[in-house]
Image (spheres, helix red, strand yellow):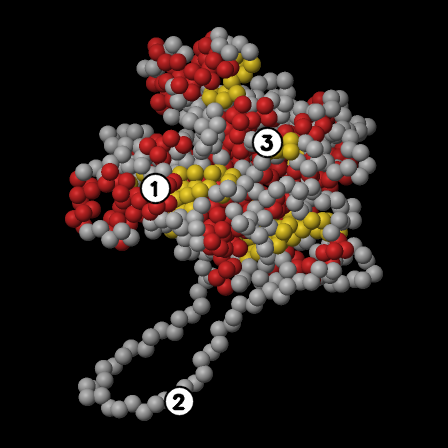
Amino acid sequence: MEQAPYTGVRVLEISAGIPASYCGKLFADAGADVVKLEPASGDPTRRWSASGTHLLKGEDSALFAFLNTGKRSVIGTLDETPRLESPELVPPRLLAGTDVLVLDQNAGLSPAAIRSLSERHPGIVVVSLAPFGLTGPYVEAGRPATEFTLQALCGSAAGRGLPDGTPTQAGGRIGEWIAASYAAAAAAAALRGRKADGQGTLIDLSILESMVVSMGGAHAIMADLGGPILGRSIELPSIEPTSDGLVGLCTITGQQFQDLLVLMDRADLLDDAELTTPRGRMMRREEFGRAVREWTTAHTTDEILELAAAMRIPAAPIGSPETVTAIDHFAERGVFVENPAGFVQPRVPYRIGDFRGVPLTAAPRLGADTVTWSARPVPPRPVPPRPVPPRPVPPRPVPPRPVPPRPVPARPVPRPGPRDLPLRGIRVLDLTAFWAGPLATHLLSALGADVIKVEGLSRPDGMRFSGTRPPSTDGWWETGNVFVVGNGTKRGLTLELGKQKARELALRLAAECDVVMENFSPRVLGNLGLDPETLRSANPRAVIVRMPAFGLDGPWRDRVGFAQTMEQAGGMAWLTGPAGGAPMVPRGACDPIAGLHAAFATLAALEHRDRTGRGELVEATMVEAALNVEAEAIVERSAYGTTLMRDGNRGPGAVPQGIYRCAGDDAWIALAVTDAAQWSALTSLIPGLTGITPERSDPQRSEHDRIDTEIDAWCAIRTPSEAVTALTGEGIAAAEVIGGARLFDDPQLAARGFFERVENPVAGEHRVFGLPFRLGDHRTWNTRPAPTLGQHNREILTGLLGLTDTEVKELEESDVIGTRPSGL
């Protein structure tokens, strides 16, 4: 690639943690000039180690080095009033050359100040990442939060664990990485929209809302559609012991579960209807788990992986910080590269043509660019032309017409409407299914792209069949909760791609689209006659986005994989679960993580296409996106030789941190103390803690058990509401552990209009997620519900491809298109 996609784009980043830093990293990897604006003391991440490793004086941490390769560092603050007596302040001219400004809650600006800054600099895309966003009752109350307490609020912790056990967090601060990925994709879209009118916008992103979408909110949608309200559970089967270690299994579809039973030589269970459902397996978890373990412990991990691959059952080794870099597939594909600081890290998780990120250069030393940057001339920003009112033109004499004039009604004078969504004019051919791919294309459709979702009649999107209504109900396949939240605002078309006529129509559609996106296993596209070369011959300008589970080459190329498989192999599961117990999958977070990285790569590829006129093949590998989000554990192991371990609900950023039972039925709160002031406040509430001095750096947490005992006793006589009110009133991050339909009652989500109402012809009126951010004036994202199967067949085929009604009817009669799954 001649130029990186975001060459010439300047990003100013003010951060003190993962969210804004990773957002900036995504742009830096894609060629943007990213400047970190730091206080004289530096970004606190420079001194952070999750393992408590002692850093030498002046040494930057491995996590900082990973997040900030290729950036510049300027010492200063975002104060637009020049104060020459203070060398720490940078003149306001720093903003004059900025295209994107990324801020997190540590930037030191109030919500009002951020909004004012955006208004004063209308040409800049301002991205604010905050726990609750910039508006709402939690923001007005100054409610403290950490990623851990947000897991309690978003519905994630409530659903993970045994029904009679303690709710369990997902390890690794996944929510912060997800929010960063959303922010980068939103900023990339806003930059594209700015091309039309030169105007930036304010992206007000809520980390909580990002986590509801990706980690816990699907249960709420299921309940709203009339499905069951799910409680805590674990996957069965999932991470199981083998004769020489552990193996990860995953059976999302009914066929995969049946194939596993055959593989286990338990065909006697094939007709056991109760075991076909996750709920049934949970009810009989001891009996079923024993049957699985009897089989897995009789084989080695490699034997099971080979057998499962032959049966196309998703399976993976359990990656740990110690072992993941040596996994054969990752080694052969060159997934891990050396950071200039001397440790191993995952590479950029996508490629665009032959571009796989700019070459790595060392993260900047604190203030290394302050002098040179301040002296650098700032190019003038092009000012978009303002509409000039027409000059009055003197009337010319008009000869009389032979025909008497007819009265002409006055035309209404058009008034300026709302600004177009940034992706208006982009058309996407969506061949994706399940969640990762549909989430990527839903983001594009919500931001204005015309997304045409193609499904087969014999194989519609599998998420349709995770329905919330029984198969005895007509149209039950239209009520899948994950399907309806992943496909809003799209148009639906059926094409049975095994038929030649359907393939011809798909190629004609590709010729009309800017993007073609798919997430089949690599062999499928070629088998359908829609390989990238054929698609490119139909449309050389099309960006072709492929989202394989493990990549387009390598030993695992043709293996089947779902989100849980990536979490098992990529190390996410390693950090989730009880201390000393087996790992647990975070449950699906890898799908949105992969989808968001694919969306960002797609927008970057469109930038390249606009400059060159040529579309490129984008490979956005799901497992490599998961590895980037799990990078902290990987770089800690490589840099310091320490292996981060799962630790139940405890974590490296707070002492104490835990989930505690309160008065009431299955009532719990999450609590995290992150500094000395909060600890002092906690001891004033719970006198039994007086005299204890918690130490984050103590690897044994010698006092944590004693602390937990005191907090347990204090919570046991209080309702969750009473406990949370008392704790947050003292500035301590705390939240009730909630899940399922209770998310609809959250006042913060309600105030921001996060849940949107749509009406489906089959499911009726129901709620879905919006996007987890506000983009300028845009608040509503699902302008229509997810399409019913084949809902827009006629509209697309006659309107876009010019087919006649007769031709459409012939396609229906030959089962090339339809509105009902085959056999139902």
Residue at position x 26%, y 91% from top?
Answer: 399
Give the residue at the far front of this rendering.
2
Observer-nearest residue: 277 or 124? 124
Residue at position x 69%, y 42% from top?
Answer: 363
Q: Secondary structure at mark 3?
A: strand
The amino acid at mark 2 is: Pro
Q: Secondary structure at mark 1?
A: helix
Q: Secondary structure at mark 2?
A: loop
Mark nearer the viewer, 2 or 3: 3
Alpha carbon separation for disc pair 2 and 1:
58 Å
The amino acid at mark 3 is: Phe
Residue, disc 3:
336
Which sits earlier in the primary sequence, circle 1 or circle 3?
Answer: 3
Q: Are marks 1 and 3 in contact (CB under 8 Å)?
A: no
Alpha carbon separation for disc pair 1 and 3:
32 Å
- Number of other residues with Cα within 10 Å of mark 1, as a class: few under 14, some 14 to 19, many 20 or more: few
Residue 316 percent coordinates (x, y): 50, 22
The amino acid at mark 1 is: Thr
Give the quadrant of residue 817.
top left
- Number of other residues with Cα within 10 Å of mark 3, as a class: few under 14, some 14 to 19, many 20 or more: many
Residue at position x 22%, y 51% from top?
Answer: 803
Residue, disc 1:
534
- Number of other residues with Cα within 10 Å of mark 2, as a class: few under 14, some 14 to 19, many 20 or more: few
Q: On screen, 742 above or below 562?
A: below
Answer with left or right where residue 402 lies relative to residue 410. Answer: left
Quadrant in which the C terminus appears: top left
Answer with left or right where residue 387 lies relative to residue 510. Answer: right
